[in-house]
Image (cartoon, rainbow, N blue to C red):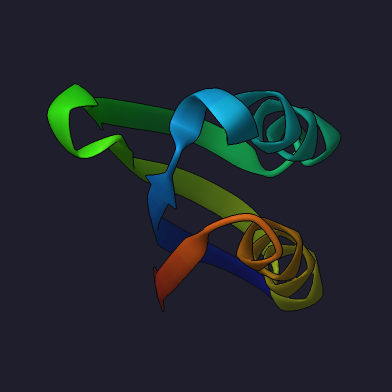
């Protein structure tokens, strides 16, 4: 069954983690439908939202990998 998930990400020190983050997103390009990010330079944090559509296992795998480098919250339907 296909699910739609909104994955919220708070990334501290985004300049240090950007390459790893982009690598993970590219790995899951088949289920990532879009993303938007807002940098907060003074706080050295970025807030991002990722929209994913795919199987529950694929979404969980994406979230698991993102959790290794960021704080992640998920809302899925």
Left or right of 26 in this view: 21: left
Asked where in the image residue 25 lies, by quadrant, the reply is: top right
Q: State whether residue 42 is above or below residue 2.
A: above
Residue 18 rendering spot, x and y as whole percentages: 60, 27
Could you tell me which residue is drawn at 60 percent across and 30 percent down? 16
Left or right of 30 in this view: 36: left
Could you tell me which residue is drawn at 61 percent across and 39 percent down? 32
Residue 48 rendering spot, x and y as whole percentages: 35, 41
Q: State whether residue 50 is above or below residue 26.
A: below
Nearer to the camera, 17 or 9: 17
Residue 70 rendering spot, x and y as whole percentages: 54, 57
Which quarter shows the C terminus?
bottom left
Asked where in the image residue 38 lies, by quadrant, the reply is: top left
Left or right of 57 in this view: 60: left
Left or right of 33 in this view: 65: right
Nearer to the camera, 11 or 49: 11
Could you tell me which residue is drawn at 40 percent across and 72 percent down? 73
């Amino acid at each position: 069954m296909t699910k739609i998930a909104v994955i919220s990400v708070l990334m501290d020190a985004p300049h240090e983690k950007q390459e790893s983050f982009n690598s993970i997103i590219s790995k899951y390009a088949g289920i990532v439908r879009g993303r938007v990010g807002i940098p907060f330079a003074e706080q050295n944090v970025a807030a991002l939202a990722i929209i994913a559509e795919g199987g529950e296992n694929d979404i969980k795998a994406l979230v698991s990998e993102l959790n290794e480098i960021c704080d992640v919250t998920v809302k899925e339907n």
